[in-house]
Amino acid sequence: MRLFHANLSRSSRILWLLEELELPCEIVPVSIIRRDGSGGRDPRNPHPDGKVPALTDGEALITETIAIVQWLCEQKPDSTLMPTVGHPQRGPWLTWLAWYAGVYEPVIGFHFAGVGDNPVLYAGFRGRAELDERLRKTLASRDWLVGDTFSAADLLFASAAIWAREILPDGDVVDAWLQRCLARPARKRAEQREAALASQEPPGERAGR
């Protein structure tokens, strides 16, 4: 497998997942267009939109975060990162992944863009307050989002704090959960791996920092 990766991007969470699963994977540092306009599209990156993460496994190309999370977890079906098919927590786990990609990230984007109160967007997605309440309520009743153990669902949401803590709800319950997630040895290893990869980034990426 090969992961096409740009530091401090959505592919950072995939590095973390690879460490959790202890899966061998070649990391290919690529340039991407950053929000500030720096960087650029990298011809080595097979992602059809020039974004990251992108994963190749043999002839298969997987490009969306949620698809990559599920693909990688399926390589280690005995891992606690993903409930197995038929497990009673399988449905809730898939629900959290789909909700993150289909609702949470869009609403957070609307919020920071200042358009979260648009009636059409609100009717389709709800608002930041509803998202925050759902996470707070869940974490007030359990240590992890699904079942009794850390899973890739926790990793997905916690990884948002890599860029900014305010992406997640405030409050002691969320702070405690986030601390548990980020203190995991695999997260520490991923941070070290990403720091080492920084020296391999294309010059345009480093200049854009």
Image (spheres, rainbow, N blue to C red):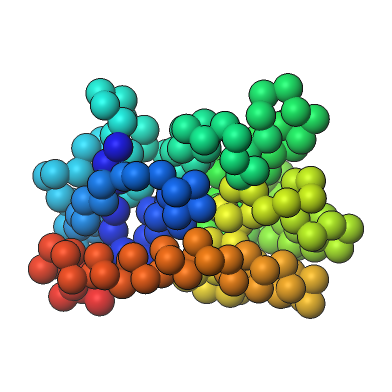
Q: Residue at x 45, y 54 (%)?
A: 19
Front in this rendered view, residue 5 or 184: 184
Q: Is residue 183 above or below residue 50?
A: below
Which x, y percent locates residue 185?
Answer: 53, 66
Residue furthest to the right:
141
Which x, y percent locates residue 174?
Answer: 74, 69
Residue 81, picture quadrant: top right
Residue 140, picture quadrant: bottom right
Q: Quadrant of the N terminus?
A: top left
Q: Quadrant of the C terminus?
A: bottom left
* 56 with respect to 162 (left or right): left
Query: In this figure, what is the number of numbered marks?
Result: 0
Q: Is residue 123 visible?
A: yes
Q: Is residue 134 visible?
A: no
* 73 with respect to 179 (left or right): left
Q: Residue at x 15, y 50 (%)?
A: 42
Which x, y percent locates residue 92?
Answer: 74, 37
Front in this rendered view, residue 56 or 95: 56
Q: Is residue 82 above or below residue 151?
A: above
Front in this rendered view, residue 88 or 100: 88
Q: Residue at x 89, y 58 (%)?
A: 141
Front in this rendered view, residue 115 or 209: 209
Which x, y percent locates residue 115?
Answer: 57, 60
